[in-house]
Image: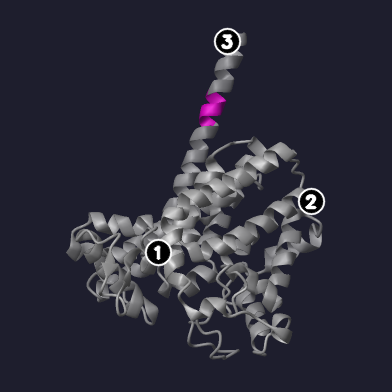
Amino acid sequence: MQNVLKNFRSGGDNLLRKNQQERYLLAFSLGFLSLAVVLLPLLIIDQGYFIYYGDFVSQQLPFYQHANEIVRNGGLLGWDWGTDLGSSFMGSYAFYLTGSPFFWITVLLPENWILYAIPWLLCLKHGIASLAAYGYIRYFVKNQDIAVIGGLLYAFSGFQIFNIFFNHFQDVTAFFPFLLIAMEEFLKNHRRGCFALSVAFMAILNYFFFAGQAIFLILYFLVRLCVGNIKITWGAFFQLMLEAILGVCIACVVLFPAAQAVLENSRVSEYLTGQDMILYSDRTKIPRIIQSFFMIPDPPARANLFQSDKSKWASIGGYLPLFSMTGVIAFFRKKPKHWASVLIALCILCAFVPVLNSMFYLFNAAYYARWYYMPVLVMAMF
């Protein structure tokens, strides 16, 4: 009898594991194929190319082509005379390509395939974003099919669609949920090492976005600790901090050359002062932020309701497809003291107060909303 029960449990565990694997595959497939179906007519018309306006054509495609030429000729760690008046290749392209696994896929392809591969890599990024978001959301919902829907909401959120012309933004959003998964694994299951590797990977992937992720992770950790049901010992806390430091140290192979290039830019030393710290001088800013979460985003340079030259490329977008903010508002009303509600409330405050928004960019004066994908992931599970 005991053997029968043991075999029954083993079969049940195997079935559960198989179902989870199938849902991971489903989440990835839906993310990949949904964008592929949309892009396919455009690819047929343009003979295999995906052409989009703005920086996609003027920067993203030429960068991929030029960076491939440099890497194939052994210039990864050298001086690049083809960028500006000459610059460090690693320092200049750490923000765009050199840390991206998607870029290195193109290095493996024949050179004349590179531009044809871009739209399929974009589909791959959305597939991974959907899969990763599903993997995170399933920690907090009972119905795993709902988690698949949440993964798709994140992968095709307003932030994602708005920023298609910034092709390398999709690299970051594709892998960001894994960083929160690593945090949850540490807090809930005491899994060691994953968080350090995740920090290192995200810092190498894109140092600019990593600065905002570090701030968001601090808020996330504090809210989970103070409002959630997470308990942590001082020993575990210091181990978590050590893993974060270790991850940053590993990433220094990219962070150092990037810092040398960035610190020479005069914009780095510009900071908010006076009333600009608490009030936006642009009167359309807050209405546009609110609009971006309730309505499908306008094209970056073609705003319909709130036009402003100051925020055209600021990546203001957060719309959740089909549902908009309905689920978020309902969750707030039902569970206002839940850790996710508190976290989103803090994010809203950060979005509305200039100096709090700027802390996601090391308090720089330039306005960007390129951190919205992080609270969007949390809202997708509502």
Disc 3 marks which residue? Answer: 3
Q: In this view, does 40 lie to the left or right of 69?
A: right
Mark 3 or mark 2, which is nearer to you?
2
Q: What element carries label 2?
A: helix
Instruction: Determine the residue located farthest toward the top in the rendered image.
Output: 1
Q: In which quarter of the image is residue 348?
A: bottom right
Residue 205: percent from left, percent from top: 44, 58
Residue at position x 47%, y 61% from top? 172
Label 3 Cα crowd, 10 Å radius (few <14 / some 14-19 / many 20+): few
Disc 2 marks which residue? Answer: 226
Q: Is residue 127 left or right of residue 348?
A: left
Mark 3 or mark 1, which is nearer to you?
1
Residue range in magenta is 11-15
Q: Which of marks 1 and 2 is nearer the N terminus?
A: 1
Is residue 126 in sight in this rendering? no
Disc 1 marks which residue? Answer: 94
Numbered badge on residue 233: none
Labels 3 & 2 near each other (Cβ < 8 A): no
Q: How far apart are marks 1 and 2 (CA)?
A: 36 Å
Q: What element carries label 1?
A: loop
Depth check: give the residue in front, 7 or 375: 375
Q: Earlier in the sequence, mark 3 or mark 2?
A: 3
Q: Which amino acid does label 3 sit on?
A: Asn
Q: In which quarter of the image is residue 372?
A: bottom right
Labels 1 & 2 near each other (Cβ < 8 A): no
Residue at position x 32%, y 79% from top? 84
